[in-house]
Each structure stands twice: as C-alpha cells, then as structure tokens.
Amino acid sequence: EVELVESGGGLFQRGGSLRLSCAASGFSLSSFWMYWVRQAPGKGLVWVSRTISDGSKTYYADYVKGRFTISRDNTRNTINLHMSNLTTEDTALYLCVRGPPGKYMDLWGRGTLVTVSS
Amino acid sequence: SYDLTQPPSVSVSPGQTASISCFGDELGDKFVCWYQQRPGQSPVLVIYEDNKRPSGIPERFSGSNSGNTATLTISVTQAMDEADYYCQAWDSTSVVFGGGTKLTVL
C-alpha cells in the first residue's frame, strides 16, 4: 500500500526540541519533493517546509526559519523534521506530504500531533 | 508575502452546483490546486494545474483560474462532498494555502 506514516509527536515544553519522522511505503521517495504541512486544532493548512528530490535544497516558511530543519534519507525512504525553540504556536497536527517536483501534493499522511505547553 | 483568500463558508442544496472561490493577486498567472478535507481525515487532491482531475476524482469536480480568481465547481453536489476545501498555489519557492472554505450540503 502506498502511504506516509508520521511519528514523533507528543507533549513538549516551550523552548524544547523534538524530531518528527515520516516513513514512506509502497513507493520510492527519491522521485518526489516532500513537504511538512501543519494544521492547528480547528484551523487551516499551513505550509512548514519542503525538500527537493535529492535533498540538496530545503525551504522554510518564515515563521520556522532558524528553528526547524527538514532532512531526508532516500535510502531509508524517510524524511525528518527537527524542531527546536518550540513555542505554543507550534501546537498542531504535522502532516507529511509528497508531490511531483514543482507541482502539487498528491499523497498526505495522517499526521502526528505536537502539543507545546507553557 | 502572497495571500490566497477564500470565503469561510459556502452552502449548497443536494443536487445543486457549488462554487468556491480563491482570490489572489494575478492568481491566473499561477497554477492552482484544490484539496478536499473531510472531517477527521487528511486532505485529498481534487484539482491540480487549475483544472485537471487526479485519477479517482469524480467528473463533478472542475476548476478554473483567470485574472485574480480561481474557482472550484462541484456539480450535482452530494452529501459526501461536505468538507473543507483549500486552494493552493506557489509564491516563488513557497507553498501558499488559502484559509479554507467549509462546504455545507443542506
């Protein structure tokens, strides 16, 4: 089955760090751009970060630059999101998403919930 | 930064046509995608590159994009179409989502 499965969420302290992981199955990540998108409870979709197919370039939304780092390991078919200096506004469901290079997002994971407490 | 604006909510009667708009500066010069998110589920791509349907998406879903407005149209709306819909475009190297529109079928 073609799917993305996120892990690593939980309850964290403000100012702390964590790493989210996304495991792909049923396809090879190496052909796709990969994204992290987040959704705060009851709110809309917000783009967080992306990495191109070979991982040589990464991009971030302004509000996470310098705090979040996206990485990928195509040999293990996984991507990660390292999050640091957490704020309560980082509380959200974090969704791992794939897409053909430069186009749309065609496969979404179910997400992993990150809660940051003060 | 680039903004995409959607109406918060749209209501439609079953069997009628629903139209959901997405407004952005010179949006017609960009490709727009639309995602459907049913309650408790992850988003699903329903339209890409303005008006193309992925495999498995009913023909009832169509899209257009011109000027400053992109539109998702759902004809013969069914109860199962009740969901949140998000438009999405690219602003240089960044992904931008609209705020989402809750479609109610009543």
Image: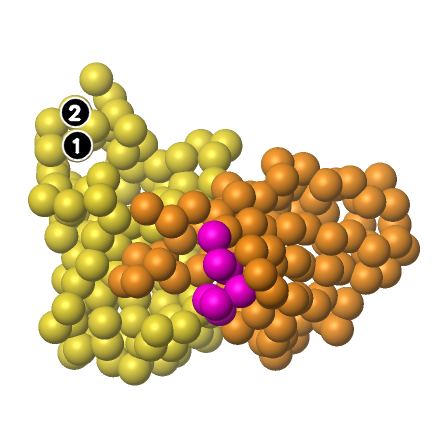
Report the residue marked by disc 1. A86
Residue B103 among magenta residues = no
* Res. A35 visible in picture: no
User: Mark 2 belongs to which amino acid?
Assistant: Arg
Residue stretch in magenta: B25-31
Camera-side residue: B48 or A108?
A: B48
Tell me where residue A70 sits by quadrant: bottom left
Judging by colour alone, the chain drawn in orange in this rendered image is: B
Disc 1 is placed on an element classified as loop
Disc 1 + disc 2, Cβ < 8 Å: yes
Residue B59 locus on image (x, y percent)? 75, 73
Looking at the rendering, in which quadrant would you find the C terminus of chain A? top left
Left or right of B46? Residue A81 is left
Mark 2 neighbour class, 10 Å CA radius: few under 14, some 14 to 19, many 20 or more: some
Report the residue marked by disc 2. A14
Q: Is residue A113 above or below residue A78?
A: above
Residue A7 locus on image (x, y percent)? 28, 51
Judging by colour alone, the chain drawn in yellow in this rendered image is: A
User: Mark 1 belongs to which amino acid?
Assistant: Leu
Left or right of B4? Residue B72 is right
Camera-side residue: B12 or A112?
A: B12
